[in-house]
Image: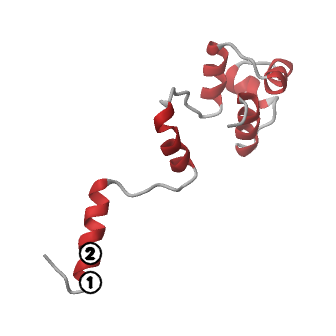
Amino acid sequence: MSKIHDQLKKRRKELHLKQEDMQLRVGMVRQQYQRLESKGNPRLDTLELVAKGLKLELMLIPQEKLHLVRNLLDGKVLPGPEESVTEKKCSLMTRGQGF
């Protein structure tokens, strides 16, 4: 996973924002925000403030669930148990093997 400062910069660019725009969003002058993006070692309260300004949420994810979150973010979500059963029923019914 990329470093936090790289993720912040990527998200800012996705939102078509300049570093100067962060002053209006989070009250941080350009030089301060530039330092955050280049060195990337913010305090937790600063990170929460910047995340909010970039329409992000901070979350602690258990390591055993991390692959699920990454798949979700990449659009590779597997159907849940209810969907699997429904899809299986539809598949069987279309093959003439109804219940």
> In the picture provided, is 22 more to the left or to the right than 68?
right
Q: Quadrant of the C terminus?
A: bottom left
Few, some or many residues within 10 Å of mark 1 (<14, 14–19, 20+): few
The residue singled out by tag 2 in the image is: 90
Q: Secondary structure at mark 1?
A: helix
- Tags 1 and 2 in contact by the CB under 8 Å rule? yes
State the CA–CA distance, disc 1 to disc 2: 6 Å
Query: In the image as oriented, which residue stretches furthest toward the front?
Result: 64
> In the picture provided, is 88 more to the left or to the right than 53?
left
Q: Quadrant of the N terminus?
A: top right
- Name which residue type carries label 1: Thr
What is the image's colouring? secondary structure
Q: Is residue 70 above or below residue 31?
A: below
The residue singled out by tag 1 in the image is: 94
Q: Is residue 40 above or below residue 8?
A: above
Query: In the image as oriented, which residue stretches furthest toward the left?
Result: 99
The one nearer the camera, 45 or 4, is 4
Q: Which mark is residue 18?
A: none
Dividing the picture into quarters, in which one does residue 21 lie? Answer: top right
Please name the residue shown 72% across and 32% down the image: 8
The spot of residue 44 in percent (x, y) is 63, 15
- Name which residue type carries label 2: Cys
> In the picture provided, is 2 more to the left or to the right than 62?
right
Q: Is residue 62 above or below residue 10?
A: above
Please name the residue shown 48% across and 45% down the image: 68
The spot of residue 36 in percent (x, y) is 79, 21
Dividing the picture into quarters, in which one does residue 37 lie? Answer: top right
Q: Secondary structure at mark 2?
A: helix
The spot of residue 15 in percent (x, y) is 70, 43
